[in-house]
Amino acid sequence: MNINKTHSSPNYNERRLGAPNMILLHYTGRPSCEEAITKWLCNPEKEVSAHYVVDEDGTIYQLVDEDKRAWHAGVSEWKGQTDINSLSIGIEIQNPGHEFGYRPFPLAQMESVAALCKNIMERFEIEYVLGHSDVAPKRKVDPGELFDWDWLSNRGVPNVHASE
Ligand SMILES: [Zn+2]
């Protein structure tokens, strides 16, 4: 699996609860992947980040080391845990989102998301693969209704929306 490491984010700190047990999927909600990376996820003024970003063409960027705590979940909760950033690997999937023209996730992009999740699952005991909207349902809708959780499950990534 090719991972582009040309960008890195200063927005992270140390994990507080040991190894991650979940993968949290987002959409960037920005018009382009370039903008999402340079203006937001790697911008110290924004104080947000993710471990990975997957562009629409399938390119995978790694911005933060997996052993560090990236800042993507915000105020959130899952199964009584509230420090979701400490417990998760965050993947931002490029899509303009509902604000800038929500559109289907291309196959090449989905293939990379599936490959990346499977790769992470080889290294960590991942119990939950879920979306930002699952852990912050009152604030967040991403990755949204066009994200195909069943397809992801069929590609070998069981998740909270489809458990095949
Ligand atoms: Zn999100």
Image (cartoon, grey):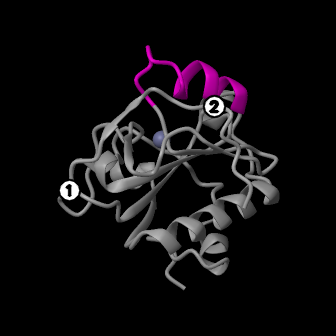
- Would you place residue 97 above or below residue 90 in this image? above
Q: Is 163 covered by the magenta stretch? A: no
Mark 2 sits on what residue? 7
Give the foreground label among 1 and 2: 2
Cβ atoms at labels 1 and 2 below 8 Å apart: no
Viewer-side residue, 49 vs 7 = 7
Binning the other alpha carbons within 10 Å of mark 2 as few (below 14), some (14 to 19) or many (20 upward) gives few
Mark 1 sits on what residue? 81
Q: Which region is colored magenta?
A: 33-48
Q: Is 40 covered by the magenta stretch? A: yes
Residue that appears at 35% across and 65% down: 21
Q: Is residue 116 left or right of residue 136?
A: right
Name the image quarter holding the C terminus. bottom right
Residue that appears at 75% across and 50% down: 104
- Would you place residue 53 above or below residue 80 in this image? above
- Would you place residue 127 above or below residue 23 in this image? below
Quadrant position of residue 145: bottom right
Tell which residue pokes out farthest to the bottom in this image.
164
Q: Which mark is residue 113?
A: none
Q: What type is the residue that disc 2 sits on? A: His
